[in-house]
């Protein structure tokens, strides 16, 4: 079976490459059609092909080039039309559409089409957001949701019929645990003693960092590390951090794959106090490293706790509850060990990429049989 996985803007390269590799191991002929990822390295392709055929000119200008986004926009329609002409797989599986309202009109005629719903819509979507979701997902023969909650939103927001939605988990990023070379922690972190609470990933307003810092004021005997590329002003966060009795350390930059393991191996607890979100690659990284997690009750996060026992859940935007849960878990090593063991079991079982690939190929076969 020949499959083309499509992520034009390389929004989720770890997921793209992990899925492509797992499908390749399962016997599929896979081509990942994407663009060059400008923030760091990506996994080497083993058992699949990569075509970086989108946004080649803007990528060649580099990440910091003046007007890069405008240049990328100018390439967009031409690149979409070129892919439309050259699409030659038995099935196309989209991960993202860069401009959903427009791109839904430019899809190749080739069927069947599958899309992974990495994000359905905001909690209170506008009429326009609902219309875009319905147009984008409605053009697919099947849509993959990573949780029952996301599947429910595809029905209620995007208006899909239940028989067009399949729940297939997001795999744990175990490739990060097997890198040929790992880099050590930065010098200022390497000699830290005592428990460490880790927030990792892009720093964005919806991730509840202000609530996290307010909650950390009640935590004793631990440090908080906030690690990731800022996509919001840092000064208000630094002001909140100064009010805490415990130490807060910022690593405000993109962290490459070889650097990631050191942070997760050192942490005692991973926190994700999001206000919104369907899923998070950080959670599936923490699963791979067998980390105890404290998550807010958004998207599919509660299912990790309810169905797998792999996380503790608190209400979003509740600094009091978040602070109490952090304090409790930092003081209770056996409870953290129990969460960690549940995370390891989940990563090796339902969230393993081979299991994900098997379920994905089963969906592909069903769609192709219907098409025939």
Image (cartoon, helix red, strand yellow):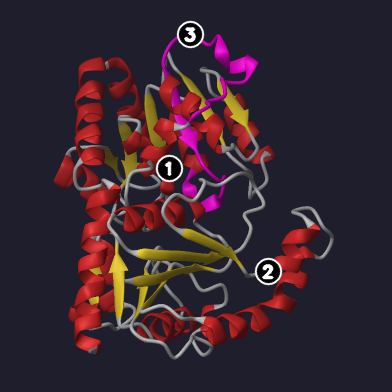
Residue at screen point 76% across, 67% down? 57
| SS category of the residue bearing label 3 | loop
* Mark 3 surroundings within 10 Å by alpha-carbon count, few (fewer than 14), some (14 through 19), many (20 or more): few
Residue that mark 3 sits on? 193
Q: Earlier in the sequence, mark 3 or mark 2?
A: 2
Question: Residue 116 is drawn in which quadrant?
Answer: bottom left
- Whether residue 203 is in magenta: the answer is yes
Span of residues in magenta:
180-208
Question: Residue 250 is drawn in which quadrant?
Answer: top right
| Above or below, 301 relative to 241 | below
Instruction: Name the quarter where the C terminus is drawn.
Output: bottom left
Q: Is residue 229 left or right of residue 68?
A: left
Residue at screen point 54% across, 37% down? 257
Residue 218 visible to the viewer: no
Q: Earlier in the sequence, mark 1 or mark 3?
A: 3
Residue 337 at x, y = what percent? 23, 21
Residue that mark 1 sits on? 282
Question: Residue 343 is drawn in which quadrant?
Answer: top left
- Whether residue 371 is in magenta: the answer is no
| Above or below, 191 relative to 88 | above
Measure the C-alpha gap from mark 3 to mark 2. 45 Å
Residue at screen point 47% across, 45% down? 208
Residue that mark 2 sits on? 55
Observer-side mark, 2 or 1, equals: 2
């Amino acid at each position: 079976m020949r499959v083309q996985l499509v992520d034009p803007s390389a929004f989720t390269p770890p997921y793209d490459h992990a899925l492509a590799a797992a499908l390749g191991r399962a016997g599929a002929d896979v081509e990942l059609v994407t663009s060059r990822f400008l923030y760091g390295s990506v996994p080497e392709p083993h058992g699949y092909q990569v075509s970086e055929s989108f946004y080649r000119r803007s990528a060649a200008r580099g990440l910091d080039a003046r007007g890069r986004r405008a240049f990328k926009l100018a390439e967009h329609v031409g690149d979409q039309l070129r892919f439309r002409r050259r699409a030659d797989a038995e099935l196309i599986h989209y991960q993202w559409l860069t401009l959903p309202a427009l791109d839904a009109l430019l899809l190749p005629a080739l069927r069947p089409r599958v899309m992974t719903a990495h994000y359905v819509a905001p909690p209170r979507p506008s009429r326009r957001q609902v219309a875009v979701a319905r147009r984008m997902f409605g053009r697919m023969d099947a849509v993959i949701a990573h949780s029952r909650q996301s599947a429910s939103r595809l029905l209620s927001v995007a208006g899909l019929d239940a028989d067009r939605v399949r729940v297939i988990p997001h795999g744990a990023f175990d490739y990060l645990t097997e890198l040929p070379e790992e880099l050590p922690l930065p010098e200022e972190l390497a000699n830290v003693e005592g428990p460490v609470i880790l927030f990792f990933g892009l720093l964005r307003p919806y991730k509840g960092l202000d609530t996290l810092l307010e909650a950390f004021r009640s935590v004793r005997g631990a440090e908080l590390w906030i690690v990731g590329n800022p996509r919001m002003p840092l000064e208000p966060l630094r002001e909140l951090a100064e009010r805490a009795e415990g130490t807060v350390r910022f690593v405000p930059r993109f962290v490459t794959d070889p650097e990631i393991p050191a942070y997760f191996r050192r942490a005692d607890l991973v926190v994700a106090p999001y206000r919104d979100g369907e899923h998070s690659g950080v959670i599936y990284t923490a699963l791979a490293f067998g980390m105890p997690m404290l998550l807010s009750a958004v998207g599919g996060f509660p299912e990790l706790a309810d169905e797998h026992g792999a996380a503790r859940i608190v209400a979003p935007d509740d600094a009091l509850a978040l602070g109490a849960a952090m304090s409790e878990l930092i003081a209770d090593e056996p409870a953290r060990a129990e969460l960690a063991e549940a995370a390891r079991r989940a990563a090796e079982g339902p969230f393993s990429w081979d299991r994900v690939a098997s379920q994905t190929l089963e969906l592909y076969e069903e769609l192709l049989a219907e098409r025939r």
